[in-house]
Amino acid sequence: EVQVVESGGGLVQPGGSLRLSCVASGFTGGRSFGHYAMSWFRQAPGKDRERVSCIANIDRSTSYTDSVKGRFIISSDTDENTVYLQMDNLRPEDTGVYYCVAAFRATRRGCDGIRFYDHWGQGTQVTVSA
């Protein structure tokens, strides 16, 4: 069973930065980290859960929700089975629980059209407040 474990959340002032990390493990049956697209979702109080960013390990293509473009950068280290989310110029509206999610893609490229988000982490709290 694939497991993903997040870390790096915390309390930061507006304009500050945080770096989230997510380590994936437990790949079996010929599957590897490279066959997965890794996403960061967030759940803000009173709001729907949204996908913030995604990286497809097979081709390193990325996507971002509009509100974080130019401020967040997603990256992946396939040697370490780790995905990162560098968050700069944080705003109070970025507050929420951030979840790392693995979606099996086999050889499909990109982050579009993902139907099943297979493996979720436990989440890490990010609070942006003065």
Image (cartoon, rainbow, N blue to C red):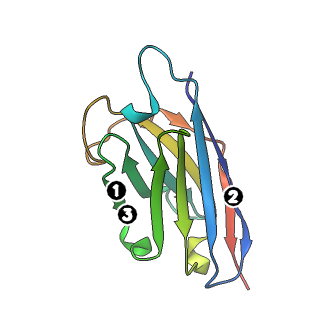
Looking at the rendered structure, the kind of residue marked 1 is: Thr
* Residue drawn at the location 65% of the way across and 47% of the way down: 6
Task: Return the x and y of residue 108 as percentages of the image width and height.
Answer: 25, 35
Task: Return the x and y of residue 52 as percentages of the image width and height.
Answer: 45, 60
Could you classify mark 1 by the number of other residues whose Cα lies within 10 Å: few (under 14), some (14-19), or many (20 or more)? some
Task: Return the x and y of residue 102 as percentages of the image width and height.
Answer: 47, 38
Q: Nearer the viewer, mark 2 or mark 3?
A: 2
Q: Name the residue under label 3.
A: 64
Q: How many marks on residues?
A: 3
Q: Can residue 52 be seen in this view?
A: yes
Q: Name the residue under label 2.
A: 8
The residue nearer to you, when weighing 78 against 128, is 78
Give SS at disc 1. strand
Contact, mark 1 vs mark 2 (Cβ under 8 Å): no
Give SS at disc 2. loop
Residue 88 in which image quadrant: bottom right
Mark 1 vs mark 2, CA separation in Å: 21 Å
Q: Quadrant of the N terminus?
A: top right
Considering every residue shown, the one lying at the far top of the view is: 29
* Residue drawn at the location 40% of the way across and 34% of the way down: 34
Mark 2 vs mark 3, CA separation in Å: 19 Å
Please give the label number shown on residue 62: 1
